Image: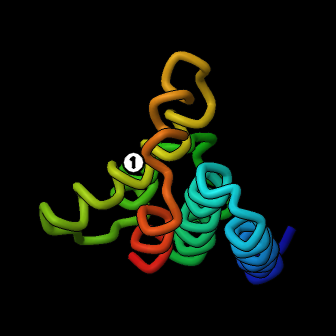
C-alpha cells in the first residue's frame, strides 16, 4: 500500500469512528462513545505515524507510545491527556473496571471529554 493511501485509510477510519462516537453519545451510550473516542485519537496518531515514520504502524492502543514513536514533541500536560484518554479503552474493555467507569460516564462527563 502506498504511503498516502495508508494515511487516508487511517483518516477515513477515524472519521467513521467519530461519527459512531457521536451516534453513541446521542443514544446516551456515554461509556461507549468515549471508548470509540479513544479509537478516533488512536487512528489519527497512526495516520501521523505513517506520514512521519512509515507504513508499518506499531500494533498498539497505547496513545502515548504512538505519539512518542511518531516523533511528536509532548509536554507533560499532553502526555497526561493521552494517558487519560487511553483509560477509556482499558476501563471499557475489562469487566472489572467497566462498572465503575460506566457509573462516572454521565452526559456531562462524556461531553467534557469529547470536547477535549
Left or right placement of residue 17 versus residue 105 in this view: right
Residue occupying the point 78% across, 72% down: 23
Q: Which residue is mark 1?
A: 65
Query: Can residue 10 be seen in the rendering of this structure?
Result: no
Q: Position of residue 97 (x, y in %)?
A: 49, 25
Left or right placement of residue 33 versus residue 69 in this view: right
Q: Judge whether 115 appears above or below 63 on screen.
A: below
Residue occupying the point 57% across, 57% down: 34
Q: Position of residue 109 (x, y in %)?
A: 42, 62
Instruction: Answer with the quarter of the image where residue 12 lies.
Output: bottom right
Q: How many marks?
A: 1
Left or right placement of residue 56 versus residue 52 in this view: right
Q: Judge whether 41 appears above or below 103 on screen.
A: below
The residue most toward the right is 1
Quadrant containing the C terminus is bottom left
Q: Position of residue 107 (x, y in %)?
A: 52, 65
Left or right placement of residue 10 versus residue 41 in this view: right
Instruction: Answer with the quarter of the image where residue 7 lies.
Output: bottom right
Amino acid at each position: 500500500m502506498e504511503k498516502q493511501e495508508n494515511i487516508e485509510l487511517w483518516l477515513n477510519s477515524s472519521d467513521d469512528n467519530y461519527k459512531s462516537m457521536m451516534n453513541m453519545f446521542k443514544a446516551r451510550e456515554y461509556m461507549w462513545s468515549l471508548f470509540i473516542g479513544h479509537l478516533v485519537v488512536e487512528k489519527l496518531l497512526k495516520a501521523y505515524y505513517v506520514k512521519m515514520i512509515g507504513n508499518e504502524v506499531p500494533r498498539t492502543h497505547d496513545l502515548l507510545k504512538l505519539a512518542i514513536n511518531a516523533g511528536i514533541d509532548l509536554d507533560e500536560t499532553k502526555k497526561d491527556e493521552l494517558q487519560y484518554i487511553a483509560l477509556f479503552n482499558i476501563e471499557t474493555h475489562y469487566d472489572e473496571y467497566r462498572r465503575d467507569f460506566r457509573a462516572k460516564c454521565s452526559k456531562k462527563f462524556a461531553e467534557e471529554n469529547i470536547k477535549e
